[in-house]
């Protein structure tokens, strides 16, 4: 009975460790390229850690952070180049 319990415990542990390793291999979501150095940046970064260039700014219409490499705000649709929604 103890042997059966140890085998079940080992299978469950192996499954959990496999799932944790699989999740570790998922790459972080990229948010585009830095306008300063061209390095890939993650979606939640405000400043590039390589060149310290700003990669996000606050939308002048709704105040939500908008990536500099996006033309339109994802919160309100404001066009940053024309200054209109």
Image (spheres, rainbow, N blue to C red):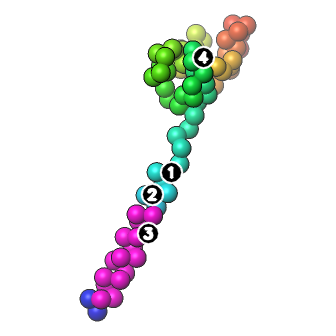
Decide whether the magenta segment is chiefly helix, strand or loop: helix
Disc on the earlier residue, 4 or 3: 3
Between 3 and 84, the one lying in front of the other is: 3
Residue 68 coordinates in the image, percent (x, y): 60, 17
Q: Are marks 4 and 2 in contact (CB under 8 Å)?
A: no
Q: Nearer the viewer, mark 2 or mark 3?
A: 2
* Residue furthest left in the image: 2
Locate the N terminus by quadrant: bottom left
Q: Which mark is residue 35?
A: 4
- Image location (x, y in percent) of residue 61: 60, 12
> Is residue 70 shown to the viewer in this render?
yes
**Of label 2 and label 3, which has the lower sequence position?**
3
| Residue 21 image offset from top left, x and y in percent | 45, 57
Callouts 2 and 3 close, C-beta under 8 Å: no
Label 3 secondary element: helix
Q: Secondary structure at mark 2?
A: helix
Q: CA distance from mark 1 to mark 2?
A: 7 Å
Q: Is residue 9 magenta?
A: yes
The local secondary structure at tag 1 comes to loop
Q: Residue 84's quadrant in the figure?
A: top right
Q: Which residues are magenta?
A: 3-18
Give how far apart the Cα atoms at labels 2 and 3 are.
10 Å
Q: Is residue 69 above or below residue 16?
A: above
Q: CA distance from mark 1 to mark 3?
A: 16 Å
């Amino acid at each position: 009975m103890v042997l059966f319990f140890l085998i079940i415990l080992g299978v469950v542990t192996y499954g959990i460790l496999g799932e944790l390793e699989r999740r570790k291999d998922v790459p972080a979501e990229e948010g585009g390229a830095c306008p300063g150095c061209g390095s890939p940046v993650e979606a939640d970064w405000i400043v590039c850690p390589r060149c310290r260039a700003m990669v996000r700014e606050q939308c002048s219409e709704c105040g939500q952070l908008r990536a500099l490499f996006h033309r339109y705000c994802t919160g309100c649709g404001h066009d940053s180049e024309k200054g209109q929604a």
